Structure formats: structure tokens, C-alpha cells
Image: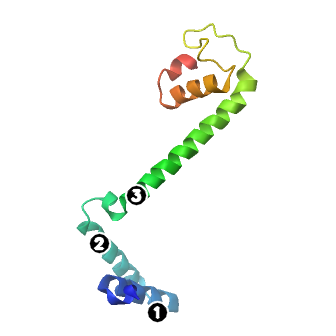
Amino acid sequence: MRHLTQAPHAANVVLIDLIVVGVASLLLQFMRVVIFVKLAKKASSGMALLPEIRHKRMLLSSSAIGVLVLFMYAAVGTPLLGNITPDGVYLSEMRNFSTVVGSLLILVDCSTFDQWHVVM
């Protein structure tokens, strides 16, 4: 019921109802965009439109997906590239593809662009 008591929400409900019914024209769709732009101008930044907790959750979930992808590549790269001898400048006893942890170290360095050209 709060959507009907506040004016911007009630205007959105009315506009959506008119669009669903088929009475809406390009003018009504334009007015909905105008209402959104007015609300966006009142906010100090784009980050203020959403709660801070939601941003932390999105950052945490996207970081978890990134770590999962790196771990999958490390797990696949260990049997494929584990026989490479560490004789180069970058590959050493700690950083090589013989273990999953070593593969993960190399992939994290490459994903942060830290000496990726030396690995290649």
C-alpha cells in the first residue's frame, strides 16, 4: 500500500497500469524516464541509490566468483602444465604449475598484471 500513498510511487503505478492496458503512448513512456531522471538528480551519486550493504554483498559475490574461476584454471593448469621445468626468470620452486597453490599464485599475479609479460 505504500506505493499508492507516496506521489512518485503512485505516478509510477498509474503509468505502469496505463502501459499494461495499452493506452500509453510515447509521451507516457517519456514521462516515466523524466521521473527517474528527477529522482537520480536528487541523489548525490549513483552509489547513494542503493544501500551500502547491497554493494558489499555484490562486491563479495563477484570476488568469490573471480576466485572460483582462478581456482578452476589453477586446478586445470596443474595437470596440463605441471611438467614445465622452472628455469626461467619468473618460474621458480615456489611459483610453478606443479602444485595448485603455485598455479594459483601465478594466476593471481597474471590477473593483477603483475609481471604477466614475464610469465608469457
Among the two numbered marks 2 and 3 on one chain, the one whose residue lies closer to the N terminus:
2
Packing grade of label 3 (10 A; few <14, some 14-19, many >=20) is few
Measured as percent of width and height from the top left, residue 96 is found at: 63, 18
Asked if 21 appears above or below 100 in the picture, the reply is below
The quarter of the picture where residue 79 lies is: top right
Tell me which amino acid carries mark 1: Val
The structure residue drawn at horizontal position 47% and vertical position 87%, both measured from the top left corner, is 19
Asked if 61 appears above or below 90 in the picture, the reply is below
Measured as percent of width and height from the top left, residue 86 is found at: 64, 10
What residue sits right under mark 2 in the picture?
A: 39
The structure residue drawn at horizontal position 33% and vertical position 89%, both measured from the top left corner, is 5
Do residues under tags 2 and 3 come within 8 Å of each other at their CB atoms? no
Closer to us: mark 1 or mark 2? Answer: 2
Closer to us: mark 2 or mark 3? Answer: 3
Quadrant holding the C terminus:
top right
Classify residue 83 as left or right of residue 107. right
Classify residue 78 as left or right of residue 108. right
Asked if 23 appears above or below 38 in the picture, the reply is below
What residue sits right under mark 3 in the picture?
A: 53
The quarter of the picture where residue 7 lies is: bottom left
What residue sits right under mark 1 in the picture?
A: 23
For marks 1 and 2, give the CA distance: 25 Å
For marks 2 and 3, give the CA distance: 21 Å
Among the two numbered marks 1 and 2 on one chain, the one whose residue lies closer to the N terminus:
1
Out of 47 and 64, give the one closest to the viewer: 64
